[in-house]
Amino acid sequence: DDMDVDTIWQDGEFVDWDDAQVHVLTHGLHYGTGVFEGVRCYDTEKGPAIFRWDEHLERFYQSGKPYNMEIPFSREELTEATLELIRRQDLESCYIRPIAFYGYDSLGVSPRDCPVDVAIAAWPWGAYLGEEALEKGVDVMVSSWRKHSSSQIPTNAKTTGLYVNSLLAGEEARRNGYVEAIVLNKEGQVAEGPGENIFLVRDGEIYTPGLSQSILDGITRQTAITLARELGYTVHDDATISRGELNTADELFFSGTAAEVTPIRKVDNVVIGDGSRGPVTAELQQAFFDLVERRTDDHEEWFTYVE
Ligand code: PMP
């Protein structure tokens, strides 16, 4: 494995990597009944700081709601566990993965008597789509797979089972030589990436699909909207974007905890703008990294320092 992790927090205890096991009859393994989060901790001037932990934790609990899944640990317990996990492993910047899933009891589809198991891991993780992608942008394809509709499965909950769709779209793109996919919703409008939200810039204004478009309401999406407005841009955060508008956009970019703010330079081999990181994307990306690496004092409320 390529994950440099020696300690994992599992159901209330810190355990060694080798001991962080689950049973093969785990409900979540068979039916995708888990919820999870992806969070980043940045190495700042004031030491490691977790970005928007409270919002991620809130989404974590909310994701369990449609599945009647009550996470049997408090916010304080999960926060302390995460901080301790970072300290114990001497991590500076890292990616944090909390997960809760129905564990082993019986294998009916109903998880009735299954326990809710919870684990948290943290490990160093660089730029998701590559360091170069942040500067030069990525080539993407519009997937032939559609995203599940919010009328079929709650797309606003970050559920493990949803990610088979992300895998199909992302791997199709990579088999065809692209870095990532853009996924349309069931109505054929632009939804998001397999693990990213998408933004479009046209005539100096910014557009991103609204929550009714079967997207996950990304925390980086919310951050980008706030930062863009603070920079004076008009942001349409409830947009409906048709496939053709991707090709005619001045700029496109992805947002996500893993992908951060990544420019898109081509869609289906059609060059977007002048085929490089556009000026609005560059400005927002700069604002984003200045924020998360704490080169500004703005939004101190979004940071949980590890100490
Ligand atoms: N959409 C999907 C499907 C995702 O998996 C993610 C990653 N969590 C995002 C959007 C971006 O969300 P966030 O900014 O909260 O990481």
Image (cartoon, grey):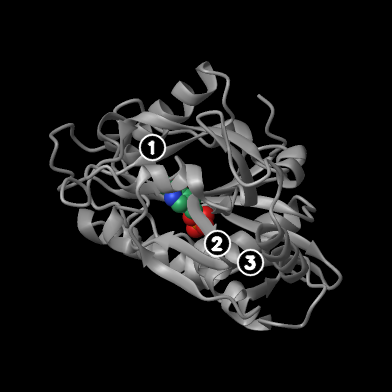
Q: Name the residue nearer the viewer: 42 or 251.
A: 251
Secondary structure, mark 3, is strand
Look at the image and tell me whether residue 12 can be seen: no
Position of residue 202 measured from the top left corner of the image (x, y, whole percent): 53, 60
Q: Which quarter of the figure is the N terminus placed in?
A: top right
For label 1, the residue is: 163
Residue 226, percent from left and from top: 56, 76
* Mark 1 or mark 2: whose residue is earlier in sequence: 1
Pointer 1 with pointer 2, Cβ within 8 A:
no
- Of discs 3 and 2, which sits in the foreground? 2
Q: Looking at the picture, how far across and down is residue 145, in whole percent?
A: 32, 30
Name the mark on residue 220.
Answer: 2
For the residues marked 3 and 1, what is the alpha-carbon distance in whole angstroms? 23 Å
Helix, strand, or loop for circle 2? helix
For badge 2, the amino acid type reads Thr
Label number found at residue 23: none
| Ligand 1 under 8 Å from disc 2 Cβ | yes
Disc 1 residue type (three-letter): Tyr
| SS for callout 1 | helix
Identify the residue position indicated by label 3 in the image. Answer: 51
Return the x and y of residue 85 as percentages of the image width and height.
66, 55
